[in-house]
Image (cartoon, rainbow, N blue to C red):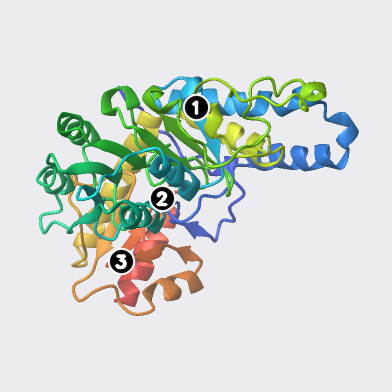
């Protein structure tokens, strides 16, 4: 049973005249996250207060919090600086034999494209791009492309331009039957859309924190299925090696790694400014409950979509679209300069592909929505 969450604007520093309907671009930080980051800055100003033992609790808390969001264990989580870093790690540790296919979506976000193009060039595999389905059913379109010659499917949970939803449990099952690997970039969904890796069973899953996880820029997390825990990391840093907790023994070089997915950690993962922000944000998301966030944002977006339809503006229908995500489609395309005109009124959305993304969060109120719809009507 889900619960509608009342407006949480007081937890953010958003002026009354700003309608930030653009979480898919970048979320604002909560006041608690800002305070945590500022405390980290002050700590770095006094390095004599930072002991070797302080390098480990923040990252370990982060692993545990992120693991709770996806129903994983902390040992299955690596800390990365970006989605592209996580995708590159996956590409290094998966096979794409000559003649096999690597499956991508039309207009997929570039960070989950370029590494696969490079891998295909290097191995002789080929990129197979699923065209945008006319009926918006990405799941069916993907399932039609699954076959024995498929080596890897690199996908999102929902499309970043319009929220088109993929049933990852069905896709994951089909890929396993075909012997293909599944790599997910869930930056545009995790934190607002429930996800369970035990049911989907991806090989790798990566997520940046600066959107729906309400966290900082330049930080992310990588889930690694235990099958790949013996793989090759992108870099060889000191903290990922076994025994790194003993600073006096770091000159005793080790060939073995920290347990689980920690071998894939980025160097300097103990970031004393970013990590506390991410942890504060994830604690709050878990307290709200992702299912409750999804229910609340779904109701908000359905109301906006209904009003937009009254203006002749379409969107992907409910059931084929992630509830937290709304991509508005205009006959003849998004009017030139519409996003900029809205921004002049301090109403912020974004245009991606053929859609205008409207992506509110719990910090938005009814006034934000009314201002947006009123401005939209006047602009048409």
Secondary structure, mark 1, is helix
Q: Residue at x 31, y 22 (%)?
A: 198
Can you identify the residue that label 3 sits on? 353
Earlier residue among tags 3 and 1: 1
> As drawn, is 203 to the left or to the right of 342?
left
Does 12 appear above or below 304? above
Toward which corner of the image does residue 267 lie, by quadrant?
Answer: top right
Give the position of the C terminus as an image quadrant: bottom left
Can you identify the residue that label 2 sits on? 360
x and y, in percent, of residue 210 in the image: 52, 47
Can you identify the residue that label 1 sits on? 261
Viewer-nearest of discs 2 and 3:
3
Distance from label 3 to label 1 (Cα)?
35 Å
Toward which corner of the image does residue 127 lie, by quadrant?
Answer: bottom left
Q: Is residue 135 visible?
A: yes
Does 2 appear above or below 150? above
Q: Nearer the viewer, residue 135 or 97?
A: 97
> Counting other residues with Cα less than 10 Å from the Cα at mark 3, is it few (<14), some (14-19), or many (20 or more)?
some
């Amino acid at each position: 049973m889900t619960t509608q969450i009342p407006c949480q604007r007081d937890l953010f520093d958003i002026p009354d005249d700003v309608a930030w309907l653009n979480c898919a671009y970048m979320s604002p930080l909560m006041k608690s996250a800002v305070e945590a980051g500022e405390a980290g800055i002050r700590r770095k100003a006094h390095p004599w207060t930072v002991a070797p033992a302080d390098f480990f609790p923040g990252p370990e808390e982060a692993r545990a919090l992120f693991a709770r969001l996806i129903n994983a264990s902390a040992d299955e989580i690596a800390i990365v600086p970006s989605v592209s870093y996580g995708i590159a790690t996956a590409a290094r540790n998966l096979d794409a034999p000559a003649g096999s296919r690597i499956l991508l979506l039309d207009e997929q976000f570039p960070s989950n494209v370029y590494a696969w193009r490079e891998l295909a060039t290097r191995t002789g595999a080929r990129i197979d791009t699923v065209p945008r389905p006319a009926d918006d059913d990405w799941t069916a379109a993907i399932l039609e492309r699954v076959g024995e010659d498929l080596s890897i499917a690199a996908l999102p949970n929902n499309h970043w331009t319009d929220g088109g939803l993929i049933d990852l449990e069905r896709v994951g099952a089909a890929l396993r039957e075909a012997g293909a690997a599944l790599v997910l970039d869930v930056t545009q969904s995790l934190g607002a859309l429930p996800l369970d890796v035990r049911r989907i069973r991806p090989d790798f899953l990566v997520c940046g924190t600066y959107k729906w996880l309400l966290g900082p820029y330049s930080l992310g997390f990588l889930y690694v299925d235990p099958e790949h825990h013996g793989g090759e990391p992108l870099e060889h840093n000191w903290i990922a090696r076994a025994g790194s907790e003993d600073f006096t023994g770091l000159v005793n070089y080790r060939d073995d790694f920290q347990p689980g997915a920690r071998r894939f950690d980025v160097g300097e993962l103990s970031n004393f400014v970013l990590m506390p922000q991410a942890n504060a944000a994830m604690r709050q998301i878990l307290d709200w409950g992702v299912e409750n966030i999804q229910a609340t944002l779904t109701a908000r977006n359905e109301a906006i979509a209904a009003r937009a339809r009254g203006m002749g503006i379409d969107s992907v229908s409910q059931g084929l679209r992630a509830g937290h995500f709304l991509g508005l489609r205009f006959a003849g395309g998004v009017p030139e300069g519409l996003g900029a005109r809205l921004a002049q009124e301090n109403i912020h959305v974004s245009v991606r592909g053929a859609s205008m993304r409207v992506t509110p969060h719990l910090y938005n109120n009814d006034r934000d929505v009314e201002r947006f719809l009123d401005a939209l009507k006047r602009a048409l």
